[in-house]
Image (tube, coloured by chain):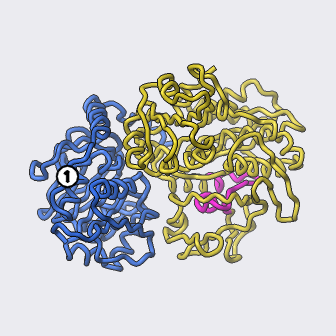
Amino acid sequence: MGSPTESAVRIVQLFPDLLGTYGDGGNATVLAKRLEWRDLAHELITLESGSPIPTDGDLYLLGGGEDGPQVEAARELAQSRALHRAVERGAVVFAVCAGMQILGHQFPDARGEPKPGLALLDIQTVRLNRPRAVGELLVHPDPCWGLPELTGFENHGGRTRLGPAARALGRVEVGEGNGWGDEGAVSGRVVGTYLHGPALARNPALADLLLSWIVGALTPLDDREVEALREERIRAARQRQLQPRRSWKDLIRRA
Amino acid sequence: MSLLIDHHLLSELTAELGREVALVSATNGKTTTTRLLSAGLAVDRPVVSNTLGANMPPGHVAALGGARPGDTAVLEVDERWLGIVLRETRASTVVLLNLSRDQLDRSFEVRKIAERWREALRTSPPRQVVANADDPIVAWAALPDGVDTASTPVGSAPSWRTIWVGTGDTWRADATGCPACGGRLDFDRGPWHCLGCDLARPQPDLWLEQDTVVYRDGRRIDLQLRLPGRVNRVNAAMALAAAEAMGVPPERASAAMRDVSEVAGRYRTATIAGCQARLLLAKNPAGWREALNMLAPPPQPVVIAINARVADGHDPSWLWDVPFEQLRGRPVVATGERRHDLAVRLRYAEVEHVVAADIIEAVQVAGSPTVDVAANYTAFQEYLEVAR
């Protein structure tokens, strides 16, 4: 762990049955292919809820999901403590949206009642009397990560506050992110974000940052096709294109 | 304000006339099933339907405006509007096909829609519900009060009759969490069932075996549809069950369904830029999985078009839930307003592809006299206008 190694990188995709609503399974595909294209061996392990979770993975993935299944995922992970042991060993965790929320100290369930999280990220998620955050999200990363702009799509009801042991991924230029101007949370090698898209498809540099924590420096790949997508999405976000019309959404919700 | 007027008009045009009404709702297949049910019922009665897919109350009012009071109405209903439309129309029959992720940035979560369906049936119970026994979220919504699939509890008589259709659907990605208790659903050992509560697959009253609908009492109906694909046989089985519940023998209904060859432009072969293009519509991962299975075999090229306008949902990240890997070994052209999202998805699927700015260029680049064009909603509507 933590240094370049000859052995295969073990990517563990957790509970796509519970946390797989927003295409975040694509993050596993992206990581696996970016290793494969560099002739780096990998093993992709996809585990549905109820399966025993290995503690010797290198990178664990959690996606977004609905309120009910989110509570179930948190319950199972709290019970097994496998993810806790993996993190103690230095494993990387990349968690999106509902997946990020359950890594914190607490998160709201379907009725808005606080539920205990896994406390692997120093964050706390609450439900505020604000409309759901839905739309393009554009983030200026904290320079410490050495990343270009982060682009994605957010879709969440909860808002997340960072504690002193968590650092944001960056500042929001367009969208809501955590809800107070920052976006995402990082504690050690545990990374959470509200970016769907999937996040690693739209932000290959972030994918490579996570992988470099495991295998060290990486050779560049031809990402021209992704660049075309990034330019288009960043431009669209800045022009406030494709921002859902709140009034119409609220109308549907009242109906 | 106009919505209130629509609701009142809808009631005036249906419940207040004593009109017989059937409602069809789902994430996928509601337009086709509405069309098939209308064809099946039309063998022995006049039928009015919102054939153009305008599936919210203004569309229903427009469709019913010219109907005679005695005409039976078959209405496709947007899944978010089922409660209101059921309340206003007092429909006798409700057909519930499936629920899966679709346009999540606007309709929120699948389970919330299922809860609304459940509430709608309890508030305005129809005489009968035709429901997909293989979609646990639909089954939970359609299960009558006082009826439990695993045990017979104390309680009142069922408030409506549910006719269960064994569709063989295998879309699981939205249904592994139990809609009743949040527990885990098991699909691997026997019929699906929840490990945490009593929810389990209801015993089907009829089911599909290849091209045949088999009834619990031993009757068999060969479908022989002109519409392609497994998914349309499912739609036909649901329509057949509803037609029978409304009094049309399935032999007669299925004969009429055989004559349906396209539905609002879907499956139509049209000429685009001198090329024979067959138009397929798919709007979400479950629909795309069915559409990929309908494609002509390789090496025939495929044009895939993705937009992300209001009606499509603004977030095309569902592209990553579609098994585009199946397209390896054939030429693919990516087009539509979100062609770059699609191109990145195809790159990671290791599918050879080119990107084209519009449908004309896409068909020309495909370079084949015949091509399948699979598009999501607004892209499809646009091509119906281009195609002749």
Label 1: which residue? A219
Chain in blue on the image:
A
> Visible in this render: residue A197?
yes
Q: Residue B346 at what x, y percent from top left?
A: 42, 44
Could you tell me which chain the residue with mark 1 belongs to? Answer: A
Q: Please provide the residue range marked out in magenta.
A: B120-143
Residue at 57 percent across and 29 percent down: it is: B368
SS at mark 1 in the image: loop
Residue at 47 percent across and 35 percent down: it is: B306
Q: Residue B378 at what x, y percent from top left?
A: 51, 31
Residue at 44 percent across and 45 percent down: it is: B351
Task: Answer above or below: position of B197 versus A144.
Answer: below
> What kind of residue is marked 1?
Thr
Chain in yellow on the image:
B
Residue B133 counted in the magenta span? yes
Does residue B386 appear left or right of residue A154 in this picture?
A: right
Give the class, few, some or many, for how many residues have Cα within 10 Å of label 1's Cα (few <14, many ≥20).
few
> Visible in this render: residue B141?
no
Q: Residue B253 at what x, y percent from top left?
A: 85, 44
Residue A99 counted in the magenta span? no
